[in-house]
Image (cartoon, rainbow, N blue to C red):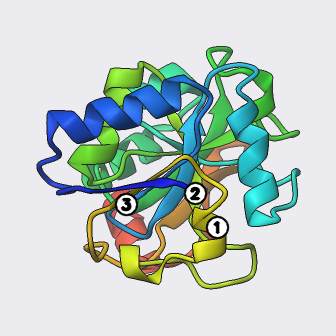
C-alpha cells in the first residue's frame, strides 16, 4: 500500500519534497498533483524500473511514451532540439502552464523515454511542487495522467483510483487540481513550404485560438 502524504501544491514543505525525492531517487513511482490533472510518474533516469511499472499500473500501451515534466522553461533546450521560433513564443506565453509541446528529443534523454520517431512531449507545469521535485532530482519527471487507461483522469486526491494507488510507492494529495483539465498538446510538422508549422494534437485547457494568437498567426 502506498504511503499517503498531504501537501500544498503552491507552497510544498521541505518534508514533503524530501520524502518524494527519496522515493523517486530509489526507483519509486509517485502519484502527484499538477495544475491540470493528477499524474503518475517517476524520475526519468536511465534503466529506472519504475518507468515500466507505470505502464503496467495504467494498462497503457508501451508505444505511448510518457511526457516529461520539467523544472524550468530553459529545460526545453536541454531535452529538446530543433525548436522553431513560434514554439519559443508559445512556451514564453504559456509556461509554466497547461501546454505540452512535442519536439525532437536531445541526446540528454535516455532512449527508453523517446518515441520511435525521435520526439518527446515536454511541459513545465504551473505547480511549485512538481517543478521543485524536478529541480531537486536534477532530471525531468516522466509522468502521465493518474488513471487506468480509458478511465477519466483524476482531478483531485479524493477521485484517485484506489487500485492504481495500491501500485505506487507514494501518493501526494494536494486537493483539487487548479485547472482540472488536461493540457493542450502542440507539435511540429513540415509544411509544403519546407517550414516547420504547428500541429495541435489535443485541444484542452488552452484553445486553438489561444495557441494561434500567441504564435501570431
Where is 30 relative to 176, above or below? above
Q: Residue furthest top?
A: 107
Q: Nearer the viewer, residue 88 or 179?
A: 179
- The quadrant in which residue 14 appears is top left
Is residue 36 shown left or right of residue 18? right
The numbered disc on residue 164 is 1
Please determine whether, in this image, residue 181 is positioned above or below residue 168.
Answer: below
Q: Which circle, 1 or 2, is nearer the viewer? A: 2
Is there any visible trace of residue 132 in the rendered image? no
Circles 2, 3 touching at the beta carbon (< 8 Å):
no
Which residue is painted at 64% across and 67% down in the image? 164
Q: Secondary structure at mark 3?
A: loop
Residue 64, percent from left and from top: 80, 55
10 Å crowding of disc 1: few (<14), some (14-19), many (20+): some
Residue 68 screen position, x and y as percent: 55, 42
Q: Residue at x 58, y 36 (%)?
A: 28
Mark count: 3
Q: Name the side, left or right, on which 205 lies relative to 54.
A: left
Where does label 2 land, which residue? 1
**Along the line of sight, the residue nearer the viewer: 114 or 188:** 114
Mark 2 or 3, closer to the camera: 2
Of the two numbered discs 2 and 3 on the same chain, state the one appearing first in sequence. Answer: 2
Q: CA distance from mark 1 to mark 3?
A: 15 Å
Residue at the disc numbered 3: 33
The residue at the point 62 percent across, 22 percent down is 45
For the residues labelled 1 and 3, say whether their Cβ atoms are less than 8 Å apart.
Answer: no
Say the numbered circle drawn on residue 131. none
Amino acid at each position: 500500500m502506498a504511503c499517503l502524504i498531504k501537501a500544498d501544491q503552491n507552497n510544498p514543505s521541505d518534508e514533503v519534497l524530501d520524502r518524494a525525492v527519496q522515493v523517486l531517487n530509489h526507483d519509486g513511482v509517485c502519484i502527484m498533483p499538477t495544475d491540470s490533472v493528477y499524474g503518475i510518474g517517476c524520475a526519468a533516469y536511465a534503466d529506472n524500473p519504475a518507468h515500466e511499472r507505470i505502464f503496467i499500473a495504467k494498462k497503457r500501451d508501451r508505444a505511448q511514451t510518457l511526457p516529461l515534466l520539467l523544472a524550468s522553461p530553459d529545460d526545453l533546450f536541454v531535452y529538446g532540439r530543433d525548436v522553431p521560433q513560434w514554439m519559443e513564443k508559445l512556451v514564453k506565453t504559456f509556461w509554466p502552464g497547461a501546454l505540452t509541446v512535442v519536439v525532437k528529443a536531445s541526446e540528454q534523454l535516455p532512449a527508453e523515454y523517446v518515441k520511435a520517431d525521435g520526439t518527446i512531449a515536454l511541459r513545465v507545469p504551473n505547480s511549485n511542487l512538481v517543478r521543485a521535485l524536478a529541480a531537486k532530482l536534477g532530471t525531468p519527471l516522466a509522468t502521465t495522467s493518474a488513471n487506468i487507461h480509458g478511465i477519466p483522469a483524476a482531478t483531485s486526491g479524493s477521485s484517485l483510483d484506489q487500485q492504481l494507488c495500491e501500485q505506487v510507492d507514494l501518493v501526494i494529495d494536494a486537493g483539487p487540481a487548479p485547472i482540472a483539465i488536461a493540457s493542450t498538446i502542440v507539435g511540429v510538422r513540415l509544411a509544403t513550404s519546407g517550414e516547420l508549422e504547428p500541429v495541435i494534437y489535443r485541444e484542452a485547457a488552452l484553445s486553438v485560438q489561444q495557441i494561434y494568437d500567441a504564435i501570431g498567426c
